Amino acid sequence: MKRKGLLIILSSPSGAGKSSLAKRLMQWDPTLRFSVSATTRKPRNGEVDGKDYYFRSRDAFEAMVAAGEMLEHAEVFGNFYGSPKGPVEQAMEEGRDTLFDIDWQGGQQIRRSSLAKDVVSIFILPPSIADLEARLRNRAQDSDEVIAGRMAKSRDEISHWGEYDYVIINRDLDVAEEELKTILKAERAKADRQPSLTEFVRGLNAEFDKR
């Protein structure tokens, strides 16, 4: 039975495990489509248009926003980033879910968009602030100054947990992954997500009539 695709939003403060969980979810279900963002910044070495990002001029990006072709967008360090609506709508019609690894602001815009009724939003919390900082330091990717900046931003990000449909406390990555899968399975099984159910039940009733 064909069902309509979902928009799955994953948000969390930096270091809470959002990206790791997104990767695991994609490995678990290869039919999932990861949302490819559009950006006005220049491509870096090795980046491919349509795979890493949709690279657009500033004028083209602003035209897409004006035409309502972006689900969400924001300006970051002088460049625009956003989620084009077209590829998401196509995936939905094909019965494929689209996964968004975005912050609360992007999630808020998508939940207010024309596709809001097909959104499933999930917020990932760390087990403690000390654990969050330890995870950022264990990455060994950022300076103390950058880590301090991420930690300062985390308090504001965490304050938006109540806007989400589901909240997972990531004490253990394996357990959090299973909780995430359970949420997705339940959302996919909802009656209003399966438009062909009415026809299927008609078929069951027709079988009764033939008995």
Image: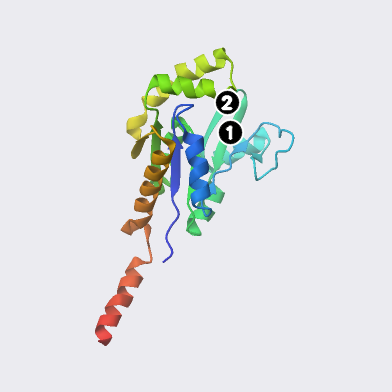
Query: Is there a contact, CB below 8 Å, between mark 2 and mark 1?
Result: yes
**Under tag 2, what secondary structure?**
strand
Query: Is the C terminus in the top left, top right, bottom left or bottom right quadrant?
Result: bottom left
Q: Residue, x 51% and y 16% (percent of image)?
A: 149
- The span from disc 2 to disc 1 (Cα, nearest Å) is 7 Å
In depth, the one of 156 and 141 nearer the eye is: 141
Residue 201 drawn at (x, y percent): 30, 71
Specify whether 161 is left or right of 5: left
Rendered view: 200 above or below 170: below
Rendered view: 187 above or below 1: above
Amino acid type for the residue under numbered disc 1: Tyr
User: Which comes before the other along the chain, label 2 or label 1?
Assistant: 2
Q: Residue, x 38% and y 63% (percent of image)?
A: 195
In depth, the one of 55 and 141 nearer the eye is: 141
Residue 136 drawn at (x, y percent): 51, 23
Residue 207 figure quarter: bottom left
Query: Is the N terminus in the top left, top right, bottom left or bottom right quadrant?
Result: bottom left
Residue 154 figure quarter: top left
Amino acid type for the residue under numbered disc 2: Val
Q: Residue, x 36% and y 24% (percent of image)?
A: 159
Residue 175 drawn at (x, y percent): 39, 40
Identify the image's colour scheme: rainbow, by chain, secondary structure or one colour. rainbow
- Crowding at dot 1, Cα within 10 Å, few <14 / some 14-19 / many 20+, comes out as many
Q: Is residue 112 visible?
A: no
**Under tag 1, what secondary structure?**
strand
Q: Residue, x 43% and y 50% (percent of image)?
A: 6
The disc placed on residue 81 is: 1
In depth, the one of 62 and 53 nearer the eye is: 53
Q: Which residue is mark 2?
A: 76
